Amino acid sequence: MPSATGVRDSLMTARRGAGNEEDTVADDVIVFSKPYRSANESVLLQEVLDSGHIHGDGRFTASAATRLQELVGGGDVLLTTSCTHALDMASLLAEIGPGDEVILPSFTFPSAATAIALRGARIVFVDIDPMTGNTTADLIEPLITPQTRAISIVHYAGVGADIERVALLARDRGLLLIEDNAHGLGGEVNGRRLGSFGHFSTNSFHDTKNIHSGEGGALVINAEPYRERAEIIREKGTNRSKFLRGQVDKYTWVDIGSSFLPSELNAAVLESQLREFDQIQAKRFAVWNAYAAGLATWAEAAGAMLMDIPEGHAHTAHMFYLLMPDHDGQTALLAHLRARGVTGTFHYGALHMSPAGMRYGHAPRPCDAARSFSERLVRLPLWPDMSDEQIDRVLDAVTSFSLSTASAR
Ligand SMILES: *Cc1c(COP(=O)(O)O)cnc(C)c1O
């Protein structure tokens, strides 16, 4: 059964490799993901430690936020402790509450769902386009009711969703739009950056993401008048940010909130990675392009589908996945890769069928594409410093697989 923690599970599987009889090349397993090491990370961390300002909102928080603003093409950027927390902040700012409905793709990360359920609102699951894994305006529109307050979407694999039309739909129907941009930093649709369409967008800097700070995230606010309240919610419900800017002479409790700001240590690592954004992306694209070129012929023969990048979209090389013809094909390919020391993995289980999804939400229309996508998806290892030899090993492992030999075994 696919699980939402696929990434972490597969990393653990890779680490456990040495004790696993099935792994014939256990010492040489190609892991699914490997956190990038930036050149200046130790220097910047030392600077923070020496500065005496280790808590949040110091100079590296400010410089990282400015760099992120450029990558998203505007908006106000607030660093957070995670994307999950940025989604929680978006729900608080959107004043989502009991009696409200929020439309959410069934195929997404659980954090986007829990951000809705935590506010006591009802999740209305929407299906996805079977080619891209993303939802569309046409799928969302019939689910809008007088109770609908917001639409929350994801740009799966860093390939933009039908975001131009979804943004128009949200505007026409007076709904708030939340973009979970955890995969999409630097991606574009028709020249406009992902993360700039919604009232709010969120990023993740978990160490499996393109840019990381161990754990971390950001909330991007693209619409007035949320900035001031966002600062307060992020600072435990106090107006401390205003106080630090000298705009009030003491700070006090003014609203609900939590502690959503990361320390300067995390911000320093994030800053060091953002300085190398272009190199990181170039390295990821080299792997992605090698997979796309090396697997096209095999995919056609195997009846597998490679990622579909729609016209006008610039993706982020966040992941490389393929879709097998059926669930048995997924299981068989993953086993085949594992036996060759290559850590492939599945991804999210369809949320409308998950225990919490059934408790906190419902799917008014079938979400069969979400279920099928989840049951057929295989992701390949992709990290910036993969060697040509490792890329070739992955390609050999995939192209040596055929469904007929798999079922004959
Ligand atoms: C990783 C991820 C999250 C959660 O990010 P954290 O920073 O770990 O909280 C949310 N949504 C998507 C789409 C993700 O990939």
Image (cartoon, rainbow, N blue to C red):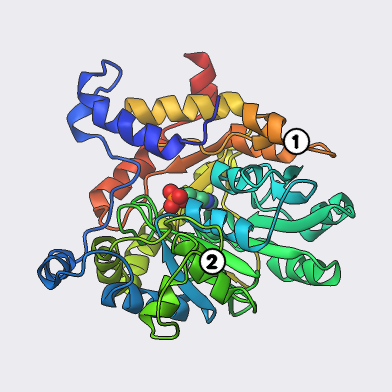
Is 60 above or below relative to 18?
below
Q: How many marks?
A: 2
Question: Horizontal placement of 157 versus 26: left or right?
Answer: right
Is 51 above or below relative to 16?
below
Q: Which residue corresponds to mark 1?
A: 368
Q: Quadrant of residue 395?
A: top left
Question: Horizontal placement of 217 versus 181: left or right?
Answer: left
Dot 1: within a 10 Å radius of its alpha carbon, few (fewer than 14), some, or many (20 or more) residues?
Answer: some
* Residue at horizontal 57 percent and vertical 70 percent from the top: 229
Question: Horizontal placement of 302 versus 26: left or right?
Answer: right
Observer-side mark, 2 or 1, equals 2
The residue lying toward the viewer, choosing from 129 and 210, is 210
Mark 1 falls on what kind of element? Answer: helix
| Figure quadrant of the N terminus | top right
x and y percent of residue 282 in the render?
Answer: 35, 68
Dot 2: within a 10 Å radius of its alpha carbon, few (fewer than 14), some, or many (20 or more) residues?
Answer: some
Mark 2 falls on what kind of element? Answer: loop
Dot 2 beta carbon under 8 Å from ligand 1:
no
x and y percent of residue 194 in the render?
Answer: 57, 70
The residue lying toward the viewer, choosing from 94 and 365, is 94
Marks 1 and 2: in contact by CB < 8 Å? no
* Residue at horizontal 36 percent and vertical 40 percent from the top: 396
* Residue at horizontal 64 percent and vertical 26 percent from the top: 355
x and y percent of residue 24 in the render?
Answer: 25, 22
Is 345 above or below relative to 134?
above
Give the residue type at disc 2.
Answer: Val
Q: Looking at the rendered structure, which numbered label has been put on residue 254?
A: 2
Q: CA distance from mark 2 to mark 1?
A: 45 Å
The residue lying toward the viewer, choosing from 135 and 401, is 135
Give the residue type at disc 1.
Answer: Asp
The residue lying toward the viewer, choosing from 111 and 349, is 111
